[in-house]
Each structure stands twice: as structure tokens, then as C-alpha cells.
Image (tube, grey):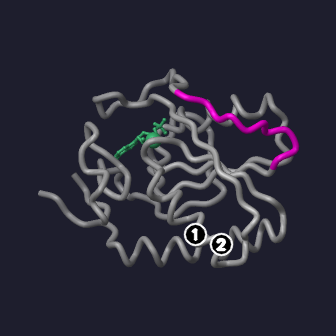
Amino acid sequence: MTQTLYSKQQIQTRIKELAKQIASDYKNQPLLLVSILKGSFIFSADMIRALYEQGLTDITVDFMQVSSYGSSRTSSKDPKIISDITTPLQDKHVLIIDDILDTGYTASFVKEHFQTQHPASMKLLVLLDKAEKRAVPLQAEYVGFILQGSPWVEGYGLDTDEQGRARPEIIEK
Ligand code: IMP
Ligand code: MG
């Protein structure tokens, strides 16, 4: 049975709340938003516009694709870079944006990879958090929703074997 966990409206309301908080935290600092593909492309597109509407207009974006699940639902302990960012990170305020934080292997790998470039600051924003499933000590500074019971979810950019990304709401699969 599929069940809607977060409707279009619930997602947009939460994005606006997060955008208010982030815009106030960064004030007039230039922000580099790094979107982790593929899952976060829709969330990133909505978030960047929500930030702009909250007055944070000095934003640049870059993209990075990291392999995690492949076609299974088990996280890889050893994520690999499929394509890297091209922006130099030194002295930049970096906000990494991902769809979902599960074991944390992907996000901690990305953070370690970026840290070697000495950004001015680095934070993590995720729409969803399977907090109970964390395998490495890592917390996101900004979280949309905490998923109780860590179900498999799909929609709003998140896939099951590449299917379901275009679904406007987030369902439990
Ligand atoms: P982690 O490395 O275990 O934290 O995995 C994070 C990545 O796994 C996310 O960026 C997603 O791409 C993917 N993922 C984890 N849980 C789900 C899910 O429930 N649905 C779809 N993708 C998921
Ligand atoms: Mg992902």
C-alpha cells in the first residue's frame, strides 16, 4: 500500500520555513549551494527560489553526482564521485543540499571531500532525515522532516530504481 507522507502543500510550507531560517542565518553573505544529484534536483530548484524570495539573492549553484544505492535499497559504505563540482570552494560559504540523509555515508563523504578545499563555512541541508538509520555520526544543520520508522520513500525527486522522481508529493513505498 502506498501512502502519502507529505503533500505538495506541506512540502512548500516547510521549504518556506527553512528558507526564512537560512536567509536569516546567512544574512547578506554570498552562498554557494551544492546540490547532490540526482535526488535533490527538485528540492534544490524550489529552495533556491524560496531563498531568493526571503531576500537571499547572492546565490551560486553547483552540482555533484555521487553513487549511493545503485538499484538496491542498501546504502554503499563507499560512495563514489560520478561527477564533481567545478567551483573552487576556498573561502566560500557552502551549503550542501541533499534529498535525504539515511546512513550518512554519502553526506559525510561529500563533506570530507570538500573540507580539503578549505571553505569559509560548510553546512548541510536535507529535506528528509532517517535519523534512526545513521551509521556515521553526522547531523544536518537544516532538516525538512524527520521520517519516523525510516520507510522507503519516493517522489519529489526521490526515486525507486530511477522511477517516481516526478511525483509531486512524497509517498511511502
Ligand atoms: P546515505 O548515504 O545512506 O545517507 O544515503 C543517502 C542517499 O540514499 C540519498 O541521497 C538518496 O539518494 C538515497 N536514499 C536513501 N533513502 C532513500 C529513500 O527512502 N528513497 C529514495 N532514495 C533514498
Ligand atoms: Mg541522493
Residue identifier under label 2: 52
Asked whether mark 2 and ligand 2 are closer than 8 Å, the reply comes as: no
114 vs 140, nearest the viewer: 114
Ligand 1: quadrant of the figure = top left
- Give me the C-alpha separation between circle 2 and circle 1: 5 Å
Task: Mark 2 and mark 1 in contact? Answer it, CB < 8 Å.
Answer: yes
- Horizontal side of residue 166 vs 82, given as left or right: left
Q: Position of residue 101 (x, y in %)?
A: 50, 46
Residue identifier under label 1: 49
Q: Against 28, is 97 above or below? A: above
135 vs 21, nearest the viewer: 21
Q: Position of residue 40 (x, y in %)?
A: 47, 50
Q: Against 135, is 148 above or below? A: below
Q: Quadrant of the N terminus?
A: bottom left
Q: Position of residue 84 (x, y in %)?
A: 61, 30
Q: Is disc 1 placed on a helix, strand or loop?
A: helix
Q: Identity of the amino acid at label 2?
A: Tyr
Q: How many marks?
A: 2
Q: Residues within 10 Å of mark 1 (few under 14, many from 20)?
A: some
Q: Against 61, is 134 above or below? A: above
Q: Position of residue 88 (x, y in %)?
A: 78, 36
Q: Is disc 2 placed on a helix, strand or loop?
A: helix
Q: Residue at x 47, y 63 (%)?
A: 145
Magenta region: 83-92
Q: Identity of the amino acid at label 1?
A: Arg
